[in-house]
Every structure is written in structure tokens, then in C-alpha cells.
């Protein structure tokens, strides 16, 4: 069956018209979907003949809730959703002082093969459809009973390796006639696919950009992140500067601190020199450990020392709270354990 959450507002109007209905029935259908309804029978203002036709050809939610893990320490909830082809993806619900955030996946698996990450251990299976990404947000809201105020695309997969579907997802979330989420409340994270960054800069100047950096030199970054062999660090930083100049928005650099690998004072100095003068922010992450990688976290204490060094060099930095550490908080861990 076809997935209704893939469709835009205009496409649902066309769908209604092709079914012999007035266009406004498409608007009503769209509104019900973004109120979280998954049963056509709950859409009380739609005609019976329209509902029957929709039930024959369309489904509203293609995900199956397989498992939920709830942190005992900070309220983080991690969801494992099954896809129609037997694959699975993870989504994470997090509570902050500024509101609720959901981290969504853009692919089943990942082909980037970053050495410290669980997401790519079994490789890429496929990109997710826009509807499958939308469903992560709406299903998390249904299961938690909470409204999601912010979306981060930092789950399994590389968003710019699935650009078209991610772009449609962003537009669906932003549509004022449906979810109506401000683009300024959406963040997309990339490991550094430069063509995608440049396209994103033009297409979505109001959406936040985060870069999974994790190393301040080409030699180390190429060892940790194979993508750097294709898109070198100087090219990546140049693309980020172009983003800040065109959008007037700061870029966030994600930097996971790995003990004995990228956490020394020399690494902090190299990082400060690399990005000095840029409109940016460094988000330091005490590594969520994944047994399969062999890496260990530098710890929060070292992260705070690293942060203070960057700040002494004039670089704005914060240390991320380690949310969900007791439930396998790193991307891909729950998916690995379930297989």
C-alpha cells in the first residue's frame, strides 16, 4: 500500500479530486494526519465513500513500534521502529528546558563508516521515505503524549545521502497547514558531504546546520571518518564559512571526545585555529561508548577542560549533557541489539 504521509498538501488536494471529491477534502485529510490520526474512521468529517477508497489503497503510518527504552536518570526515551521491509530505525525523545526534542533517523543503516559510530556497522540498507521520517515525529508524540518543539536529524544515516526525501520531510514539517514547525527549530547534521551542504545552504537558509567534525586535522579525521578522504577538511571549513556568510546563521560543530584519540590540549589548539573567526559553536560530546568500536569516552571532566581551552581562544563551546547513557544513547545501539 502507498504511504499517505509522503504527500504534500497540494498532492492530497489532487488525490481528493481524483477520487471524485472536492479539493477541500484533501485539506481535511491533511489536517487529520498532522493531528496524529492513523485510522481513517476517526476522520469524522470525511465522506464514507472517500474513506472506503482510501482504505483500499493507502496507509497512514508505515512504522511498527518494536521497543521503547526509558532512561531512569533524565527522561530520555529511545524508540525502535520496524519498517515494512523488515529493517528498523531508531528515534530518541529528549526533554530540555527550552522544550522537547526528537532525534530522527534518515536512513536504515549508513554507508559513511565512521569508526566510532554504531550506525554504520552493518552498512546502508536504504534511505527512508519522507513519510517514514514524518512518522517518527508523530509516533513519538503519540507514544509520549508530549508535543515535539524541535527536530534534530542526527539519528542513523547521513541526511545528505538521502537529500530529496529529507528536503521533502523538512517542507512537510514546516507547512503551516499541517505541522507548522518553524524551520529555525530544525537542525540537520552531516558528516561533511560538501555538495549537500552547498545545496542545503541555498534551499534551506533558515534550517540549522550541524557538522560532525570530531577531528581538527586531515590525518586524524580521515582515520576516524572515511568521508574526509573525499572531502578534505579545508574544503569542508570553506563550505561552512560560505553557509554562515550566506545565511547569517552560525554553524554547530559536533565533536565527540574519544580518550587518547582526539582529546589532547594539542587537539584543542588545532581545533581553535581551524575555526577561529567563524560564526560557529562547538558542541563537545563525551562519547557514548559502543563496544564494537573499541573506543572509550574521554569523560565529562575532560570535556569541560577542553571547552575552557576553546573559550580561552575565543571559540564558543558547550558540553552536551549525556542523555540516555543508561539506555544505549548512541545512534544505532538499540538497532544492533535487536538483530
Image: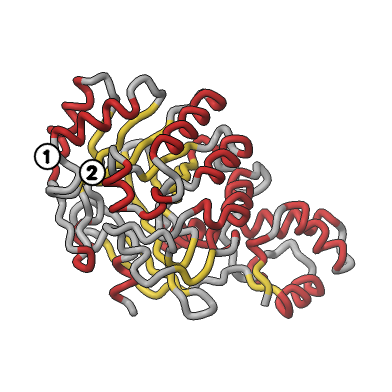
Callout 2 secondary element: loop
Quadrant of the image occupied by residue 303:
top left
- Residue 320's quadrant in the figure? top left
At 48% from the left edge and 72% from the top edge, which residue is drawn? 125
Gap in angstroms between the C-alphas marked 2 and 1 = 14 Å
Secondary structure under badge 1? helix
Residue 151 visible in this rendered orientation of the protein: no
Is residue 183 placed above or below 65 in the rendered structure? above
How far across and down, in percent of the image, does residue 33 sit? 63, 59
Q: N-terminal of the two: label 2 or label 1?
A: 1
- Measured as percent of width and height from the top left, residue 112 is found at 41, 59
Residue that mark 1 sits on: 302
> Is 240 placed above or below 145 here?
above
Q: x, y percentage for residue 154?
A: 40, 51
Q: What's the residue at 58%, 53% (across, down)?
A: 163
**Dot label at residue 321:** 2
Pointer 1 local density, CA inside 10 Å: few below 14, some 14–19, many at least 20: some
User: Does any portion of residue 70 appear in the rendered image?
Assistant: yes
Dividing the image into 4 quarters, which one contains the C terminus? bottom left
Residue at 64% in and 73% down = 59
Question: Which residue extends farthest left?
Answer: 301
Residue 90 position, x and y percent, is 39, 64
Above or below 317: residue 192 = below
Labels in figure, total:
2
- Up/down of 111 relative to 236, above or below: below
Amino acid at each position: 500500500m502507498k504511504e499517505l504521509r509522503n504527500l504534500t498538501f497540494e498532492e492530497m488536494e489532487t488525490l481528493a479530486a481524483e477520487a471524485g471529491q472536492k479539493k477541500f477534502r484533501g485539506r481535511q485529510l491533511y489536517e487529520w494526519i498532522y493531528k496524529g490520526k492513523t485510522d481513517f474512521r476517526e476522520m469524522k468529517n470525511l465522506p464514507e465513500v472517500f474513506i472506503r477508497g482510501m482504505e483500499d489503497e493507502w496507509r497512514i503510518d508505515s512504522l511498527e513500534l518494536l521497543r521503547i527504552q526509558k532512561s531512569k536518570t533524565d527522561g530520555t526515551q529511545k524508540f525502535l521502529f520496524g519498517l515494512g521491509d523488515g529493517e528498523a530505525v531508531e528515534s530518541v525523545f529528549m526533554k530540555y528546558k527550552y522544550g522537547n526534542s526528537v532525534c530522527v533517523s534518515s536512513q536504515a543503516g549508513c554507508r559513511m563508516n565512521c569508526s566510532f559510530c554504531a550506525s554504520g556497522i552493518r552498512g546502508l540498507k536504504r534511505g527512508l521515505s519522507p513519510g517514514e521520517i514524518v512518522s517518527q515525529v508523530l509516533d513519538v508524540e503519540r507514544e509520549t503524549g508530549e508535543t515535539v518543539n524541535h527536530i534534530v536529524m542526527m539519528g542513523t544515516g547521513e541526511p545528505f545521502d538521502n537529500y530529496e526525501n529529507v528536503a521533502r520531510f523538512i517542507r512537510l514539517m514546516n507547512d503551516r497547514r499541517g505541522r507548522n514547525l518553524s524551520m529555525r527549530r530544525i537542525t540537520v547534521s552531516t558528516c561533511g558531504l560538501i555538495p549537500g551542504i552547498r545545496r542545503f545552504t541555498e534551499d534551506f537558509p533558515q534550517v540549522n546546520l550541524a557538522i560532525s567534525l570530531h577531528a581538527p586535522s586531515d590525518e586524524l579525521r580521515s582515520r576516524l571518518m572515511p568521508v574526509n578522504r573525499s572531502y578534505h577538511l579545508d574544503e569542508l571549513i570553506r563550505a561552512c564559512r560560505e553557509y554562515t556568510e550566506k545565511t547569517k546563521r552560525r554553524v554547530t560543530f559536533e565533536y565527540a571526545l574519544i580518550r587518547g584519540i582526539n582529546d589532547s590540549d594539542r587537539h584543542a589548539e588545532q581545533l581553535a585555529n581551524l575555526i577561529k573567526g567563524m560564526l560557529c559553536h562547538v558542541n563537545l560530546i563525551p562519547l557514548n561508548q559502543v563496544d564494537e568500536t573499541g573506543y572509550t569516552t574521554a569523560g565529562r571532566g575532560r570535556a569541560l577542560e577542553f571547552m575552557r581551552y576553546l573559550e580561552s581562544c575565543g571559540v564558543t563551546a558547550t558540553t552536551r549533557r549525556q542523555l540516555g547513557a543508561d539506555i544505549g544513547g548512541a545512534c544505532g545501539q538499540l538497532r544492533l541489539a535487536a538483530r
